[in-house]
Image (cartoon, grey):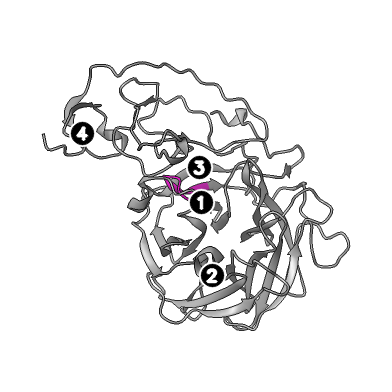
């Protein structure tokens, strides 16, 4: 896809942008700035590869550059809709990028790298638990590290509270008891998705509440990491059509500006990504436009672009079109479960994607099929065009054995997944 042919363009004339900046399902986005570069990740649930990595130079134009996870645990060989990678956080500490996320059925995982465009480390299970979700770290000025998290009621039996646990500075394990720091049942039900920051000596927790579709963005503030925390609603839908504006990332710029990246749930497109300006008053952030001055902002539809002291950048959105000329699938493609050797080829017929029929069980319902190759809706209205050739597999490849002992022909394309064909025992 050429940058100029984007199906959704967030750029406007005269240095303005429009929301959403990404009209695609990058759920629960988190962003970190390193120098002049911004890196985003988002929930990927059961899709593989997981943990997408996006890059931008201005917070408006984004491009997929990588995924941090190549494979999920073996249970994800079959689709587990809505399970897996929930609400990650991406951070940069002492030359290393970290991503933490909570799997509601398994616990807290971490992966890291010194190059977000390169290979990320194998997943480390930081803490084994059911119901720990929405994890976010903070490395404090004194060298101590902490991990904030919420709870999934479907697993833990409760929600609407936030906890903080002490963590080893290398991010590999929890070092002490996780302590409740805020109870949102009365004023901020379903509070979740915490992001932990420190500014001018105070601790801040940015956390959405009220539910995904109809909620708001809450900010908590305290002089102590474990509280008590004061609370304030800093962003709400108000008179705008942008429902449930919450859960995202506070991003600071060298220019002194602050911005907030968040999502809006729009069925059936998923959770699309918005960008809001942030102002500060009496130690509290005000997100969006606060026309009545009550401290609670409303989302902006258009705004002047962030001051990043950069030249005008070309329109960039996450990739969509694919001519299948490369040796690997484009980053926009994800499987519905852990991919297996033999599902596809890009080399049997250069310039085309070849998909091979698979037996995925007794059901003929695609809901249970892991070998669905998918990408996100890229805009509110778009046209998708493809050319399809159907037929029997050509007489190429090598002979192997199926699980039932029958001889089958294996396609010759071990480079698809970066490894050799499976050992069939023949």
Identify residue for label 4.
402
At mark 1, the secondary structure is loop
Number of marks drawn: 4
Upstream in the sequence, badge 1 or badge 2?
Answer: 1
Provide residue 111's location: percent of width, then percent of height.
40, 59
Read off the residue under disc 2. 157
How many angstroms separate mark 4 from mark 1 (CA)?
A: 31 Å
Give the class, few, some or many, for how many residues have Cα within 10 Å of label 4's Cα (few <14, many ≥20). few
Instruction: Give the quarter of the image for residue 364.
Output: top left
Judge by depth and name the residue closer to the eye, 68 or 114: 68
Look at the numbered disc 4 and give the secondary structure of its residue: loop
Mark 3: few/some/many CA within 10 Å (<14, 14-19, 20+) = many
Q: How far apart are marks 3 and 2 (CA)?
A: 36 Å
N-terminal of the pair, mark 4 or mark 3, is 3
Mark 2 neighbour density, 10 Å: few (under 14) some (14–19) many (20 or more): few
Mark number, residue 82: 1
- Location of residue 285 in the rendering, given as x and y in whole percent from the top left corner: 73, 67
Is residue 286 in sight in this rendering?
A: no
Comes first in the chain, label 2 or label 4: 2
Quarter occupied by residue 290:
bottom right
């Amino acid at each position: 896809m050429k940058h100029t042919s984007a199906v959704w363009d967030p750029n406007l004339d005269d240095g303005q942008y429009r929301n959403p900046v990404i009209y695609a399902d990058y759920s629960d986005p988190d962003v970190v700035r390193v120098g002049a570069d911004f890196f985003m990740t988002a929930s990927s649930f059961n899709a593989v590869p997981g943990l997408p990595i996006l890059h931008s130079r201005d917070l408006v134009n984004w491009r997929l550059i990588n995924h941090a996870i190549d494979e999920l645990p073996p249970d994800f060989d079959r689709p587990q809709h809505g399970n897996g990678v929930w609400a990650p956080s991406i951070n940069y500490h002492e030359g290393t990028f970290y991503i933490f996320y909570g799997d509601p059925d398994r616990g807290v995982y971490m992966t890291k790298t010194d190059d977000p465009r390169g290979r990320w480390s194998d997943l480390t299970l930081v803490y084994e638990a059911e119901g720990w979700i929405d994890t976010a770290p903070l490395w404090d000025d004194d060298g101590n590290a902490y991990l904030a998290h919420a709870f999934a009621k479907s697993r833990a039996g409760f929600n609407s509270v936030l906890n903080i646990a002490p963590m080893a500075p290398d991010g590999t394990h929890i070092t002490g008891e996780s302590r409740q720091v805020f109870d949102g049942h009365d004023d901020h039900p379903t509070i979740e998705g915490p992001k932990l920051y420190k500014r001018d000596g105070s601790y801040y927790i940015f956390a959405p509440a009220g539910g995904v579709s109809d909620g708001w963005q809450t900010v908590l503030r305290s002089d102590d990491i474990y509280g008590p925390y004061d609370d304030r609603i800093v962003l709400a839908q108000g008179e705008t059509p942008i429902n449930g504006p919450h859960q995202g990332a506070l991003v600071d710029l060298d220019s002194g500006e602050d911005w907030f990246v968040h999502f809006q749930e729009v069925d059936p497109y998923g959770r699309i990504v918005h960008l809001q300006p942030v102002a500060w008053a009496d130690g509290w952030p005000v997100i969006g436009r606060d026309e009545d001055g009550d401290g609670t902002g409303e989302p902006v539809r258009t705004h002047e672009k962030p001051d990043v002291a950069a030249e005008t950048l070309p329109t960039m959105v996450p990739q969509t079109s694919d001519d299948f000329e490369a040796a690997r699938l484009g980053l926009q493609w994800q499987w519905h479960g852990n991919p297996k050797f033999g599902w596809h080829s890009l080399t049997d017929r250069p310039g085309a994607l070849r998909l091979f029929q698979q037996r995925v069980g007794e059901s003929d319902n695609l809901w249970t099929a892991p070998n669905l190759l998918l990408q996100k809706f890229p805009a509110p209205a778009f046209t998708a065009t493809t050319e399809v050739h159907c037929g029997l597999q050509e007489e190429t490849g090598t002979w192997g054995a199926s699980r039932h002992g029958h001889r089958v022909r294996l396609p010759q394309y071990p480079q698809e997944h970066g490894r050799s064909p499976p050992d069939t025992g023949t």
